[in-house]
Image: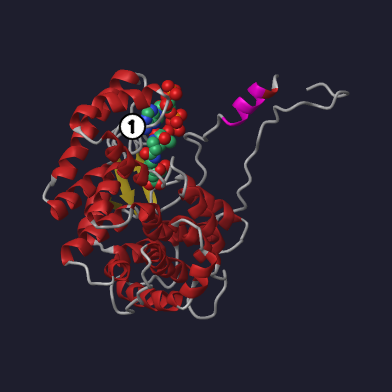
Amino acid sequence: MSDSSILARASSNGLDKVVAAETALSHVDGEAGRLIIAGYDLEALVATHDFEATAALLWSTAGLDPAPSASEVRAQLGAARVAAFRLVPVLLAAARGLTVTEGLRAGLSLLPDEDKDLPAHIRAVGSVPVFVAALCRRDEGLPAVAPVAYAGHAEDFLRMLRGAPASAAEVEALNAYLVTVTDHGMNASTFTARVIASTRAGLISATVGALCALKGPLHGGAPGPVLDMLDAIGTRDHIKPWLVDEISKGERLMGFGHRVYKVRDPRADVFNKAVMLLTNGNERVKFARDVEAVALSTLKEMKPDQRLDTNMEYYTAILLEALGIPRSAVTAVFALSRIVGWSAHVIEQERVGRLIRPASTYIGHWPDNQAA
Ligand code: SDX
């Protein structure tokens, strides 16, 4: 077998439909377009839980004992934000020249896996909004803003980011986003977290690895490029020609397609509602809707054998932009929520799992004196 076909075959496997773990944390039904998180349909969860309550639900479902209440989680996350703020000067010195996501990677790496004060899952989740807000303000030439221990996680993040309180509608919209993206089955970054947890490396180490996986544009790095796409298209008369040209070049349209969802990602509709609450359907939202409609019809025309629908990142981009979150920070804000799911999977994996070590098929050259 030639070297090029060896390389082609070696990279072809995406582990599609391979069951890597049993979990009680979430279930993704790609044919029905349904997401269940810890026993709740997504829509019911968003209607009844804020970020802290969802974190408490996932950690207790993962087997954390004693199971935390939402108010205990709120208090612990507040203490963790305050503790993380003491690391900001070290973080900013270490993150010089790094993007916000790379800076967050550096920040999480400052945390020890073991600590006598706060448990790892609380330190991991509590640190992210503090680091992300400080890195965003660094990019604006502004000083970091200290957290407020008694505030809610979403509310405190927006205040640390802006240096001023956010409106109740903005906090509600961000909570809806954060609750929605906490967990999503065995996606690439969650799988990464479980592999690292299975070696008993520690929760913080597992979340650092998971963040590295999330960073990729095929996974959590898509929202920024969605906004870049809308800007590149510019006007309604350019929508169709721009999309046709992009797909003809073999490029992927960011915010469309999904390994599991073969119909519209249910999360897109949750974000769409939140966007409407915030913007009342302004011109940017109307334009994004028009681009989405033409993208779906064009993908159908040009990729008739593929079932490519809108995924969550498309409306994530519109929602986070409407909340004034810098384009450079959208992946880090995804991590602000998904780190709850990663930590819950680590707790579950450490409780029930074994070392994750799959097999592989050798397709390389055999030594001359040995037949394949
Ligand atoms: C997330 O797994 C999760 O749960 C992830 C996530 C989560 O909550 O954790 O839901 C979050 O990652 C959402 C996805 C965000 N990514 C993007 O929006 C990037 C754009 N999407 C694609 O790159 C793609 O759809 C993937 C990576 C998401 C899934 O692709 P697959 O299943 O690996 O399929 P593939 O790349 O093998 O493509 C199959 C065909 C190809 O056509 P051919 O080359 O065979 O002709 O479909 C085409 C692809 O070109 N295709 C697309 C496309 N997605 C797939 N063509 C144009 N635009 C796209 N977006």
User: Would residue 206 be found to the left or right of residue 186 on screen?
Assistant: right
Residue 273 visible, this orientation: yes
- Camera-side residue of 61 and 238: 238
Magenta segment range?
4-11
Q: Quadrant of the N terminus?
A: top right
User: Would residue 152 be found to the left or right of residue 366 on screen?
Assistant: left
Q: Residue at x 76, y 26 (%)?
A: 365
Q: Position of residue 192 (x, y in %)?
A: 53, 50
Asked which quadrant contains residue 122, the reply is bottom left
- Camera-side residue of 108 and 270: 108
Q: Residue at x 33, y 32 (%)?
A: 262
Q: Residue at x 21, y 31 (%)?
A: 293
Q: Position of residue 107 (x, y in %)?
A: 50, 65
Q: How is the image coloured?
A: secondary structure
User: Would residue 292 be found to the left or right of residue 365 on screen?
Assistant: left
> Vertical placement of 179 versus 238: above or below?
below
For badge 1, the amino acid type reads: Lys
Q: Position of residue 187 (x, y in %)?
A: 44, 45
The residue wearing badge 1 is 262
- Camera-side residue of 172 and 28: 172
Residue 259 visible, this orientation: no
Q: Position of residue 158 (x, y in %)?
A: 28, 66
Provide the major secondary structure of the magenta segment: helix
Looking at the rendering, the quadrant in which ligand 1 lies is: top left
Q: Residue at x 48, y 74 (%)?
A: 89
Q: Quadrant of the C terminus?
A: top right
- Camera-side residue of 138 and 54: 138
Asked which quadrant contains residue 301, the reply is top left
> Vertical placement of 357 versus 264: above or below?
below
